[in-house]
Image: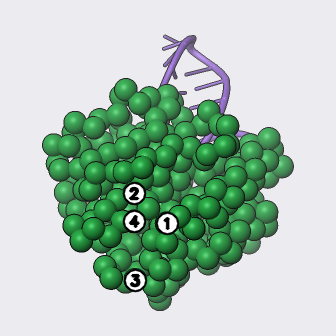
Chain colours: A green, B purple
DNA sequence: ATGGCGTACACCGTACGA
């Protein structure tokens, strides 16, 4: 089973890339973030045409998340239960594969935070607290669970092209890294770090100043898994290919493969 | 140096992302 995540920075603009990528990489599920379109504009027909189901939580202009999957999504949950938030940043669904083993899949678009100390930064930290509280329950209910998405946190200095230049900045501040660690402390594993990885692998590069060509980036898109599922993870990679296409998203997809029990 | 680039909405600029 392969699960993937991709912040597409507008699904209107990137639908062609998503379809091309799925046809070249027929994963079982692809979690999307930053749809930037309302529910009624979600292109479900184009995805059905290539053999995928979808569930989504859209929002005009900002945010918006989806799960595109070969299996029909079950028990779909939008938003963090009990956390009143007009921003559409979470969707969860249970996917049963052909062997019938259900996996709980969550697509997450964690807040950016804009600048350390700002109102948006405070919102980011509160949002992570709510996420952690909800996940503590969700993990109990679903032993095989993966939460994939744009966390807007680079967990360690190894995930930043120039840690000295970024020190204390948004995406790497102590409080943000502690919020991310709070998820790890629930028993979740950053599947990328289960494996030996080359240095300087990132998932986001600024559009400006040829950052992608210079590999000036950060690793902020992650696939976290519960112990049962992480124990069956055999690979986790960043696919840089679509970042080099015409009019790319500034994020690259991340893909993890899991052995079935 | 809050600039650089890209997207959306709307207006001929502003908000936001990371």
The residues bearing labels 1 and 2 have C-alpha atoms spaced at a distance of 9 Å
Q: Chain of mark 2?
A: A
Place residue A220 in its image quadrant.
Answer: bottom right
* N-term-proximal mark, 3 vs 1: 1
Secondary structure of residue under mark 1:
loop
**Tag 2 and tag 4 share a subunit:** yes
List the residue tagged with mark 1.
A142
List x then y, in percent, for residue A50. 17, 48
Instruction: Work out whether residue A209 or residue A30 is closer to the camera in this orientation and state it.
Output: A30
Q: Is residue A116 left or right of residue A91?
A: right
Residue A150 visible, this angle: yes
Q: Is residue A158 left or right of residue A46?
A: right
Residue neighbourhood size for the residue with mark 2, other residues' Cα within 10 Å, grouped as few (<14), some (14–19), many (≥20): many
Q: Are marks 4 and 1 in contact (CB under 8 Å)?
A: yes
Instruction: Work out whether residue A161 or residue A173 is closer to the camera in this orientation and state it.
Output: A173
The residues bearing labels 3 and 4 have C-alpha atoms spaced at a distance of 12 Å
Q: Are marks 1 and 2 in contact (CB under 8 Å)?
A: yes
Query: Disc number at residue A94?
Result: 2
* N-term-proximal mark, 4 vs 1: 4
The residues bearing labels 4 and 1 have C-alpha atoms spaced at a distance of 7 Å
List x then y, in percent, for residue A65. 46, 45
**Tag 1 and tag 2 share a subunit:** yes
Q: Residue at x 75, y 50 (%)?
A: A126
In the rendered view, tell whether residue A227 sits above or below residue A28. Answer: below
The residues bearing labels 3 and 1 have C-alpha atoms spaced at a distance of 15 Å
**Tag 3 and tag 1 share a subunit:** yes
Q: Are marks 2 and 4 in contact (CB under 8 Å)?
A: yes
């Amino acid at each position: 089973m392969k699960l993937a995540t991709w912040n597409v920075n507008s699904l209107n603009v990137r639908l062609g890339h998503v379809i091309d990528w799925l046809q070249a990489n027929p994963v079982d599920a692809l979690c999307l973030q930053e749809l930037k379109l309302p529910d009624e504009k979600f292109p479900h027909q184009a995805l059905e045409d290539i053999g995928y189901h979808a569930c989504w939580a859209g929002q005009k202009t900002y945010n918006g998340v989806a799960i595109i999957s070969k299996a029909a999504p079950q028990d779909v949950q939008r938003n963090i239960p009990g956390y009143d938030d007009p921003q559409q940043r979470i969707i969860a669904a249970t996917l049963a594969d052909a062997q019938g083993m259900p996996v709980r899949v969550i697509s997450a678009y964690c807040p950016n935070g804009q600048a350390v100390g700002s109102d948006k930064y405070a919102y980011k930290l509160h949002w992570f607290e709510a996420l952690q509280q909800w996940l503590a329950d969700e993990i109990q209910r679903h032993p095989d669970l993966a939460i994939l998405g744009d966390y807007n946190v680079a967990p360690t200095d190894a995930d930043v092209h120039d840690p000295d230049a970024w020190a204390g900045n948004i995406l790497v501040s102590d409080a943000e890294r502690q919020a991310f660690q709070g998820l790890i402390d629930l028993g979740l594993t950053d599947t990328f770090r289960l494996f030996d990885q080359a240095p300087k692998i990132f998932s986001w590069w600024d559009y400006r100043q040829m950052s992608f060509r210079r590999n000036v980036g950060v690793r902020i898109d992650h696939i976290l898994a519960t112990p049962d599922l992480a124990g069956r993870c055999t690979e986790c990679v960043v696919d840089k290919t679509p970042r080099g296409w015409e009019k790319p998203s500034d994020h690259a997809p991340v893909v993890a493969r899991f052995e079935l029990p």
